Image (cartoon, grey):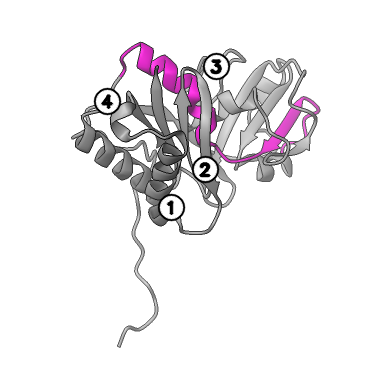
Amino acid sequence: MERIILIETSTALCSAALAEDGAITAYRESSAPKAHASLTAVFIQEILTERGISLSDCDAVCVSMGPGSYTGLRVGVSTAKGLCFGSGKPLIAVGTLDTLVAQASDIIPSTCNVIQSEAEGTPYRFIIPMIDARRMEVYAAVFSPDGQQLTETAPAIIDENSFAEYLEQGPCLFIGDGAGKCADVIRHPDAHFIQCQPKASSMLLPARKAYKEKRFEDVAYFEPFYLKEFVATVSKKKLF
């Protein structure tokens, strides 16, 4: 039986799941603020206990590689590396945008707010996953409906003309935690928006594909894809 632990901590939602033979059999998530460090390992232990197995019974550990929150990605990758170092299991990394594209085909109404249009049954020409960044900026890329990435992942400043060349070709689905602010600016009739956060359960298909193709990461040297360098700021408050 193929078992893969899935870890998604790239945004405000912290989640973990267990995939067994192509199905999600256990899942945990929390949107509690700044709780990734305290919850990620706990979630993994809970899903293993729920299934009555241990880490040694699993075949691989899959983690979100970004882009996304610097702190969230560090927590997820550190946890995944610890599991792999301790068990000798291979490490798989899945891009956050790839997870959102997979999630687009399996929208759960209770957790994803459909801002405009319905996701199911709409013949989208392009899927544009996006992660919220500062102000009117997002991390985004353009995908085909079958999950092929057509452009590089890059930061984009959103205005009324953003992604116009794709919208002119047909309906586009904007999905992710950056979709909400785009819905307020991009008014094209073929623009449809789903505000949601990537979930560990939606890593299933890309994780299985990487596992079957043996696309494993070097546990010692793997680093998340931050897209931008982390910038530390100095507090203006006097300490003394």
Image quadrant assignment for residue 212: top left
Tag 2, which secondary structure?
strand
Mark 4 or mark 1, which has the lower sequence index? 1
Residue type, mark 2 in image: Arg
Disc 4 to disc 1, C-alpha distance: 22 Å
Image quadrant assignment for residue 127: top right
228 or 14: which is nearer to us? 14
Disc 4 to disc 2, C-alpha distance: 22 Å
The residue mark sitting in front, 3 or 4, is: 4
Residue type, mark 4 in image: Pro
Residue type, mark 1 in image: Leu
At a point 37% along the width and 40% down the height, the residue shown is 226
Circle 1/circle 2 CB separation < 8 Å: yes
| Mark sitting on residue 90 | 4
Circle 2/circle 3 CB separation < 8 Å: no
Residue type, mark 3 in image: Gly
| Mark sitting on residue 39 | 1
Mark 2 or mark 3, which has the lower sequence index? 2
Disc 3 to disc 1, C-alpha distance: 30 Å
Would you place residue 189 above or below residue 49 in this image? above
Residue density around tag 2, few if under 14, some if 14–19, many if 20 or more, within 10 Å: many
| Mark sitting on residue 28 | 2
